[in-house]
Image (tube, helix red, strand yellow):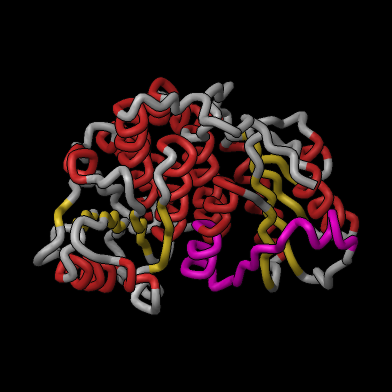
Amino acid sequence: MYQEIMEIPCVVERLLIEGAEDMRATAKSLRELDPAFIISVARGSSDHVATYFKYASELLLGIPVASIGPSIASIYKCEMALKGAACISISQSGKSPDILEMTRMATSMGVVSVAITNETTSPLANQSSHVLSLHAGTELSIAATKTFVTSAVSAIWLLAEWADDATLRRAIFDLPRSLEKALNMDWSSVKNALNKDNSLFCLGRGPSLAIAHEAALKFKETCQIHAESYSSAEVLHGPVSIVGSGFSVIAFAADDAAGNAIVEVADNLSKKEADVFITSEKLTRAHTLPVARTGHPLTDPIALITSFYVLVEQIASGMGKNPDAPRHLNKVTETV
Protein backbone atom coordinates (compact mmCIF):
# COMPACT_ATOMS: atom_id res chain seq x y z
CA MET A 1 0.00 0.00 0.00
CA TYR A 2 2.80 2.42 0.90
CA GLN A 3 4.58 1.80 -2.40
CA GLU A 4 1.39 2.30 -4.41
CA ILE A 5 0.61 5.55 -2.57
CA MET A 6 4.08 6.80 -3.45
CA GLU A 7 3.40 5.92 -7.13
CA ILE A 8 0.36 8.20 -7.33
CA PRO A 9 2.03 11.25 -8.97
CA CYS A 10 3.73 9.04 -11.56
CA VAL A 11 0.63 7.06 -12.49
CA VAL A 12 -1.41 10.26 -12.77
CA GLU A 13 1.22 11.66 -15.14
CA ARG A 14 1.09 8.46 -17.20
CA LEU A 15 -2.71 8.66 -17.32
CA LEU A 16 -2.57 12.24 -18.58
CA ILE A 17 -0.14 11.28 -21.34
CA GLU A 18 -1.51 7.92 -22.45
CA GLY A 19 -5.20 8.57 -21.86
CA ALA A 20 -5.57 11.83 -23.74
CA GLU A 21 -6.89 10.49 -27.05
CA ASP A 22 -9.61 8.31 -25.50
CA MET A 23 -10.56 11.09 -23.10
CA ARG A 24 -11.07 13.64 -25.87
CA ALA A 25 -13.08 11.18 -27.98
CA THR A 26 -15.34 10.24 -25.06
CA ALA A 27 -15.92 13.87 -24.07
CA LYS A 28 -16.78 14.72 -27.69
CA SER A 29 -19.34 11.91 -27.80
CA LEU A 30 -20.98 13.08 -24.58
CA ARG A 31 -20.97 16.71 -25.67
CA GLU A 32 -22.73 15.75 -28.89
CA LEU A 33 -25.24 13.61 -26.99
CA ASP A 34 -25.99 16.46 -24.56
CA PRO A 35 -27.68 14.11 -22.05
CA ALA A 36 -30.51 15.33 -19.86
CA PHE A 37 -29.01 13.44 -16.94
CA ILE A 38 -26.28 10.93 -16.10
CA ILE A 39 -26.46 7.71 -14.12
CA SER A 40 -23.47 6.36 -12.23
CA VAL A 41 -22.90 2.67 -11.51
CA ALA A 42 -20.28 1.69 -8.93
CA ARG A 43 -19.61 0.18 -5.51
CA GLY A 44 -17.10 0.76 -2.71
CA SER A 45 -14.25 3.18 -3.39
CA SER A 46 -15.44 3.47 -7.00
CA ASP A 47 -18.80 4.71 -5.75
CA HIS A 48 -17.00 7.43 -3.81
CA VAL A 49 -15.46 8.50 -7.12
CA ALA A 50 -18.99 8.55 -8.53
CA THR A 51 -20.06 10.89 -5.71
CA TYR A 52 -17.15 13.18 -6.57
CA PHE A 53 -18.18 13.03 -10.25
CA LYS A 54 -21.78 13.85 -9.31
CA TYR A 55 -20.91 17.06 -7.51
CA ALA A 56 -18.41 18.11 -10.16
CA SER A 57 -20.88 17.48 -13.00
CA GLU A 58 -23.63 19.43 -11.31
CA LEU A 59 -21.31 22.32 -10.46
CA LEU A 60 -19.49 22.46 -13.78
CA LEU A 61 -22.08 21.41 -16.35
CA GLY A 62 -25.37 21.73 -14.49
CA ILE A 63 -26.18 18.13 -15.45
CA PRO A 64 -27.69 16.06 -12.62
CA VAL A 65 -26.15 12.70 -11.76
CA ALA A 66 -28.05 9.87 -10.05
CA SER A 67 -26.38 6.85 -8.46
CA ILE A 68 -28.32 3.75 -9.48
CA GLY A 69 -28.19 0.68 -7.27
CA PRO A 70 -26.80 -2.08 -9.52
CA SER A 71 -29.16 -4.61 -7.90
CA ILE A 72 -32.03 -2.93 -9.78
CA ALA A 73 -30.77 -4.78 -12.85
CA SER A 74 -28.89 -7.75 -11.38
CA ILE A 75 -31.30 -8.88 -8.63
CA TYR A 76 -34.62 -7.24 -9.42
CA LYS A 77 -34.33 -7.49 -13.23
CA CYS A 78 -36.05 -4.13 -13.59
CA GLU A 79 -35.53 -2.02 -16.69
CA MET A 80 -35.34 1.71 -16.10
CA ALA A 81 -36.42 4.67 -18.21
CA LEU A 82 -33.01 5.91 -19.31
CA LYS A 83 -33.89 7.72 -22.53
CA GLY A 84 -31.76 10.82 -22.90
CA ALA A 85 -29.21 9.68 -20.29
CA ALA A 86 -25.52 8.83 -20.27
CA CYS A 87 -24.08 6.09 -18.07
CA ILE A 88 -20.76 6.27 -16.18
CA SER A 89 -19.60 2.93 -14.74
CA ILE A 90 -16.57 2.90 -12.46
CA SER A 91 -14.82 -0.34 -11.49
CA GLN A 92 -11.12 -0.98 -10.97
CA SER A 93 -11.45 -4.63 -12.03
CA GLY A 94 -14.43 -4.36 -14.36
CA LYS A 95 -15.58 -7.79 -13.18
CA SER A 96 -18.40 -7.31 -10.67
CA PRO A 97 -21.53 -8.98 -12.08
CA ASP A 98 -23.98 -6.38 -10.75
CA ILE A 99 -22.02 -3.43 -12.20
CA LEU A 100 -21.77 -5.32 -15.45
CA GLU A 101 -25.50 -6.12 -15.60
CA MET A 102 -26.59 -2.51 -15.00
CA THR A 103 -24.15 -1.30 -17.66
CA ARG A 104 -25.31 -3.97 -20.09
CA MET A 105 -28.93 -2.89 -19.57
CA ALA A 106 -28.07 0.77 -20.17
CA THR A 107 -26.01 0.05 -23.29
CA SER A 108 -28.73 -2.22 -24.72
CA MET A 109 -31.20 0.67 -24.39
CA GLY A 110 -29.02 2.86 -26.60
CA VAL A 111 -27.47 4.84 -23.73
CA VAL A 112 -23.92 6.10 -24.29
CA SER A 113 -21.99 4.23 -21.60
CA VAL A 114 -18.51 5.01 -20.32
CA ALA A 115 -16.41 2.52 -18.36
CA ILE A 116 -13.69 3.95 -16.12
CA THR A 117 -11.56 0.91 -15.32
CA ASN A 118 -8.02 -0.34 -14.86
CA GLU A 119 -8.77 -3.43 -16.96
CA THR A 120 -9.51 -2.50 -20.57
CA THR A 121 -10.21 -6.12 -21.59
CA SER A 122 -12.64 -6.71 -18.72
CA PRO A 123 -16.30 -7.68 -19.18
CA LEU A 124 -17.31 -4.13 -18.18
CA ALA A 125 -15.10 -2.63 -20.87
CA ASN A 126 -16.61 -4.98 -23.45
CA GLN A 127 -20.15 -3.89 -22.53
CA SER A 128 -19.47 -0.14 -22.74
CA SER A 129 -19.57 2.37 -25.59
CA HIS A 130 -16.35 4.04 -24.42
CA VAL A 131 -13.52 2.84 -22.18
CA LEU A 132 -11.26 5.12 -20.17
CA SER A 133 -8.24 3.21 -18.91
CA LEU A 134 -6.75 4.27 -15.58
CA HIS A 135 -3.23 3.39 -16.78
CA ALA A 136 -2.41 2.69 -13.12
CA GLY A 137 -0.58 -0.58 -13.60
CA THR A 138 -1.15 -3.56 -11.31
CA GLU A 139 -2.45 -2.66 -7.86
CA LEU A 140 -1.50 -5.41 -5.40
CA SER A 141 -2.75 -3.95 -2.14
CA ILE A 142 -6.35 -4.85 -1.37
CA ALA A 143 -6.91 -1.28 -0.21
CA ALA A 144 -7.25 0.76 -3.41
CA THR A 145 -5.23 3.97 -3.49
CA LYS A 146 -3.66 4.73 -6.85
CA THR A 147 -6.71 3.38 -8.70
CA PHE A 148 -9.01 5.58 -6.60
CA VAL A 149 -6.94 8.64 -7.46
CA THR A 150 -6.67 7.81 -11.16
CA SER A 151 -10.41 7.13 -11.26
CA ALA A 152 -11.07 10.54 -9.71
CA VAL A 153 -8.65 12.22 -12.12
CA SER A 154 -10.35 10.48 -15.05
CA ALA A 155 -13.76 11.61 -13.82
CA ILE A 156 -12.85 15.28 -13.45
CA TRP A 157 -10.77 15.27 -16.64
CA LEU A 158 -13.74 13.93 -18.59
CA LEU A 159 -15.85 16.82 -17.31
CA ALA A 160 -13.12 19.37 -18.05
CA GLU A 161 -12.86 18.20 -21.66
CA TRP A 162 -16.64 18.03 -21.99
CA ALA A 163 -16.97 21.63 -20.76
CA ASP A 164 -13.78 22.74 -22.56
CA ASP A 165 -12.73 24.40 -19.31
CA ALA A 166 -9.16 25.62 -19.80
CA THR A 167 -8.62 26.63 -16.16
CA LEU A 168 -9.68 23.24 -14.82
CA ARG A 169 -7.70 21.44 -17.52
CA ARG A 170 -4.59 23.36 -16.48
CA ALA A 171 -5.05 22.33 -12.83
CA ILE A 172 -5.53 18.69 -13.89
CA PHE A 173 -2.32 18.65 -15.92
CA ASP A 174 -0.47 20.16 -12.98
CA LEU A 175 -1.72 17.42 -10.63
CA PRO A 176 1.45 15.28 -10.74
CA ARG A 177 3.36 18.18 -9.14
CA SER A 178 0.55 19.00 -6.72
CA LEU A 179 0.31 15.36 -5.63
CA GLU A 180 4.06 15.16 -5.01
CA LYS A 181 3.54 17.97 -2.51
CA ALA A 182 0.48 16.26 -1.07
CA LEU A 183 2.53 13.16 -0.27
CA ASN A 184 4.73 15.27 1.99
CA MET A 185 2.05 16.94 4.10
CA ASP A 186 2.55 16.16 7.81
CA TRP A 187 -0.72 14.89 9.28
CA SER A 188 0.92 13.08 12.20
CA SER A 189 -1.06 15.20 14.68
CA VAL A 190 -4.10 13.09 13.78
CA LYS A 191 -2.19 9.87 14.40
CA ASN A 192 -1.09 11.08 17.82
CA ALA A 193 -4.57 12.19 18.88
CA LEU A 194 -6.67 9.37 17.48
CA ASN A 195 -8.57 7.31 20.03
CA LYS A 196 -8.18 3.88 18.46
CA ASP A 197 -10.76 2.29 20.78
CA ASN A 198 -13.53 4.61 19.70
CA SER A 199 -15.26 5.85 16.58
CA LEU A 200 -14.56 8.96 14.58
CA PHE A 201 -16.29 11.15 12.04
CA CYS A 202 -14.99 12.06 8.58
CA LEU A 203 -16.72 15.16 7.25
CA GLY A 204 -16.91 16.92 3.91
CA ARG A 205 -19.32 18.89 1.78
CA GLY A 206 -19.77 19.15 -1.96
CA PRO A 207 -17.02 17.33 -3.87
CA SER A 208 -15.03 16.80 -0.66
CA LEU A 209 -17.86 14.68 0.76
CA ALA A 210 -16.62 11.89 -1.52
CA ILE A 211 -13.22 12.16 0.16
CA ALA A 212 -14.83 11.86 3.59
CA HIS A 213 -16.58 8.68 2.43
CA GLU A 214 -13.32 7.23 1.13
CA ALA A 215 -11.42 8.15 4.29
CA ALA A 216 -14.00 6.48 6.54
CA LEU A 217 -13.84 3.32 4.43
CA LYS A 218 -10.03 3.24 4.63
CA PHE A 219 -10.08 3.59 8.42
CA LYS A 220 -12.37 0.57 8.60
CA GLU A 221 -10.67 -1.68 6.08
CA THR A 222 -7.01 -1.00 6.94
CA CYS A 223 -7.12 -0.12 10.67
CA GLN A 224 -10.34 -1.80 11.85
CA ILE A 225 -11.31 1.57 13.32
CA HIS A 226 -15.01 2.43 13.14
CA ALA A 227 -15.44 5.65 11.17
CA GLU A 228 -18.59 7.28 9.83
CA SER A 229 -18.71 9.83 7.03
CA TYR A 230 -21.19 12.69 6.86
CA SER A 231 -21.82 15.92 5.08
CA SER A 232 -20.98 18.72 7.48
CA ALA A 233 -24.55 19.87 6.84
CA GLU A 234 -25.93 16.55 8.16
CA VAL A 235 -23.71 15.78 11.14
CA LEU A 236 -25.55 18.26 13.38
CA HIS A 237 -28.89 16.57 12.58
CA GLY A 238 -28.47 13.75 15.10
CA PRO A 239 -24.99 12.21 14.82
CA VAL A 240 -23.49 15.05 16.88
CA SER A 241 -25.14 13.51 19.94
CA ILE A 242 -22.31 10.98 20.31
CA VAL A 243 -19.57 13.63 20.18
CA GLY A 244 -17.80 14.31 23.46
CA SER A 245 -14.41 14.69 25.07
CA GLY A 246 -11.71 12.97 23.03
CA PHE A 247 -13.97 12.09 20.08
CA SER A 248 -11.97 12.46 16.85
CA VAL A 249 -13.14 14.29 13.72
CA ILE A 250 -11.36 14.84 10.41
CA ALA A 251 -12.96 17.45 8.15
CA PHE A 252 -11.96 17.69 4.49
CA ALA A 253 -12.40 21.24 3.22
CA ALA A 254 -11.55 22.28 -0.32
CA ASP A 255 -10.93 25.92 -1.17
CA ASP A 256 -14.48 26.37 -2.43
CA ALA A 257 -17.84 27.90 -1.49
CA ALA A 258 -18.48 25.20 1.14
CA GLY A 259 -15.18 25.78 2.93
CA ASN A 260 -16.44 28.32 5.47
CA ALA A 261 -19.47 26.17 6.30
CA ILE A 262 -17.26 23.15 7.06
CA VAL A 263 -14.99 25.31 9.24
CA GLU A 264 -18.01 26.55 11.20
CA VAL A 265 -19.11 22.98 11.93
CA ALA A 266 -15.56 21.95 12.83
CA ASP A 267 -15.28 24.76 15.36
CA ASN A 268 -18.73 23.88 16.71
CA LEU A 269 -17.61 20.30 17.34
CA SER A 270 -14.41 21.54 18.96
CA LYS A 271 -16.53 23.42 21.50
CA LYS A 272 -17.95 20.02 22.47
CA GLU A 273 -14.40 18.92 23.39
CA ALA A 274 -13.88 16.80 20.28
CA ASP A 275 -10.40 16.55 18.74
CA VAL A 276 -11.15 18.13 15.36
CA PHE A 277 -8.71 18.36 12.46
CA ILE A 278 -9.53 20.24 9.28
CA THR A 279 -7.78 21.08 6.01
CA SER A 280 -8.25 24.81 6.41
CA GLU A 281 -6.51 27.74 8.09
CA LYS A 282 -9.71 29.72 8.63
CA LEU A 283 -10.71 27.96 11.86
CA THR A 284 -10.75 29.43 15.35
CA ARG A 285 -10.70 26.31 17.56
CA ALA A 286 -10.05 23.14 15.53
CA HIS A 287 -6.58 21.94 14.48
CA THR A 288 -5.25 22.82 11.03
CA LEU A 289 -3.97 20.11 8.69
CA PRO A 290 -1.48 21.33 6.06
CA VAL A 291 -2.67 20.96 2.48
CA ALA A 292 -1.30 21.03 -1.05
CA ARG A 293 -3.68 23.27 -2.99
CA THR A 294 -4.04 22.46 -6.67
CA GLY A 295 -5.12 25.78 -8.16
CA HIS A 296 -8.75 24.74 -8.59
CA PRO A 297 -11.43 23.83 -6.03
CA LEU A 298 -12.56 20.81 -8.06
CA THR A 299 -9.11 19.20 -8.00
CA ASP A 300 -8.31 20.03 -4.36
CA PRO A 301 -10.13 16.91 -3.10
CA ILE A 302 -7.71 14.68 -5.06
CA ALA A 303 -4.75 16.18 -3.18
CA LEU A 304 -6.60 15.80 0.14
CA ILE A 305 -7.16 12.07 -0.29
CA THR A 306 -3.54 11.59 -1.33
CA SER A 307 -2.34 13.18 1.92
CA PHE A 308 -4.85 11.10 3.86
CA TYR A 309 -3.64 7.83 2.32
CA VAL A 310 -0.15 8.49 3.71
CA LEU A 311 -1.68 9.04 7.16
CA VAL A 312 -3.93 5.98 7.22
CA GLU A 313 -1.15 3.67 6.06
CA GLN A 314 1.01 4.97 8.91
CA ILE A 315 -1.78 4.43 11.43
CA ALA A 316 -2.45 0.87 10.24
CA SER A 317 1.22 -0.06 10.27
CA GLY A 318 1.68 1.54 13.69
CA MET A 319 -1.16 -0.60 15.03
CA GLY A 320 0.48 -3.76 13.72
CA LYS A 321 -2.16 -4.21 11.00
CA ASN A 322 -1.30 -5.31 7.48
CA PRO A 323 -2.89 -2.66 5.25
CA ASP A 324 -2.01 -4.69 2.15
CA ALA A 325 -4.25 -7.58 3.17
CA PRO A 326 -7.06 -6.51 5.54
CA ARG A 327 -8.93 -9.36 7.18
CA HIS A 328 -12.06 -10.74 5.51
CA LEU A 329 -11.37 -8.85 2.25
CA ASN A 330 -10.40 -9.79 -1.31
CA LYS A 331 -8.97 -7.53 -3.98
CA VAL A 332 -11.91 -8.11 -6.28
CA THR A 333 -15.40 -8.32 -4.77
CA GLU A 334 -17.86 -9.78 -7.25
CA THR A 335 -21.35 -9.00 -5.96
CA VAL A 336 -24.46 -10.08 -7.86
Q: Residue furthest front?
A: 197
Judge whether residue 33 can be spotted in this image. Answer: yes
Locate the N terminus and report the quarter of the image it occupies: top left
- Provide residue 265's location: percent of width, then percent of height: 25, 71
Residue drawn at (37%, 52%) of the image = 301
Q: Is residue 167 left or right of residue 36?
A: left
Q: How many marks?
A: 0
Quarter of the view holding residue 120: top right
Q: Residue furthest bottom?
A: 237
Report if residue 246 lies within the magenta region.
Answer: no
Q: Nearer the viewer, residue 272 or 50?
A: 272
Q: Is residue 17 left or right of residue 219?
A: right
- Provide residue 282's location: percent of width, then percent of height: 14, 64
Judge whether residue 10 can be spotted in this image. Answer: no
Q: Nearer the viewer, residue 160 or 301?
A: 301
Quarter of the view holding residue 263: bottom left
Q: Nearer the viewer, residue 221 or 281?
A: 221
Q: Say if 222 sits above or below 281 in the image.
A: above
Residue drawn at (68%, 58%) of the image = 30
Report if residue 76 lies within the magenta region.
Answer: yes
- Provide residue 202's location: percent of width, then percent of height: 36, 56
Residue drawn at (14%, 55%) of the image = 287
Q: Is residue 210 left or right of residue 233?
A: right
- Provide residue 145's location: percent of width, then percent of height: 47, 34
Residue drawn at (67%, 33%) of the image = 332
Q: Nearer the viewer, residue 329 or 73?
A: 329
Q: Say if 224 sits above or below 284 in the image.
A: above
Q: Which residues are magenta?
A: 52-77
